[in-house]
Amino acid sequence: MIARLWSARTTPDQASAYAAHLRDRVLPELRSIPGYAGSKLLERTVSNVVEITVITFWQSLDSIKAFAGDDIERAVVADEAAAVLTDFDRHVRHCEVVMTDEV
């Protein structure tokens, strides 16, 4: 299993708009890709900035390529998402999932 991590920043007023975009636009697309294995949306507020981290889980690099294209390190950010973000990472990180403990 591979975790794909991406981060962005937004305002407190726009954080829910990004969550709605992820839920309503991105996740339905991801669910249609063989090898997609779930996701998590994390938020942390520091001063007046909401830090967003999206973690998606994939069975293989090939399944990530089906979503991201050949350059799997490039972030995939729709214009609709970029419009509600103040800043976002242009690249992602991939980590092998070594262990999980979900209760």
Image (cartoon, helix red, strand yellow):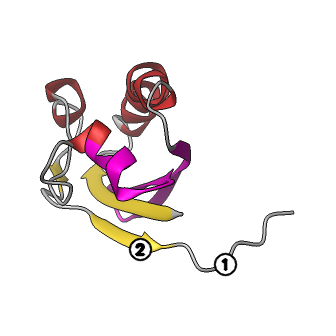
Q: Is residue 57 magenta?
A: yes
Q: How many marks?
A: 2
Of residues 37 and 86, the one drawn nearer to the viewer in this rendering:
37
Judged left or right of residue 29, residue 102 is: right
Amino acid at dot 2: Cys
Judged left or right of residue 38, residue 65 is: left
According to the picture, the residue beneath numbered tag 1 turns out to be: 99
User: For the magenta stretch, what is the residue range?
Assistant: 36-65
Of residues 33 and 19, the one drawn nearer to the viewer in this rendering:
33
Establish if 78 lies above or below 65: above
Quarter of the image with the C terminus is bottom right
The quadrant holding residue 26 is top left
Residue 63 in the image: x percent, y percent? Answer: 38, 45
Secondary structure beneath dot 2 equals strand
Secondary structure beneath dot 1 equals loop
According to the picture, the residue beneath numbered tag 2 turns out to be: 95
Residue 51 in the image: x percent, y percent? Answer: 36, 59
Residue 1 in the image: x percent, y percent? Answer: 54, 63
Mark 1 and mark 2 residues within 8 Å of each other at the beta carbon? no
3D distance between C-alphas at marks 1 and 2: 11 Å
Amino acid at dot 1: Met
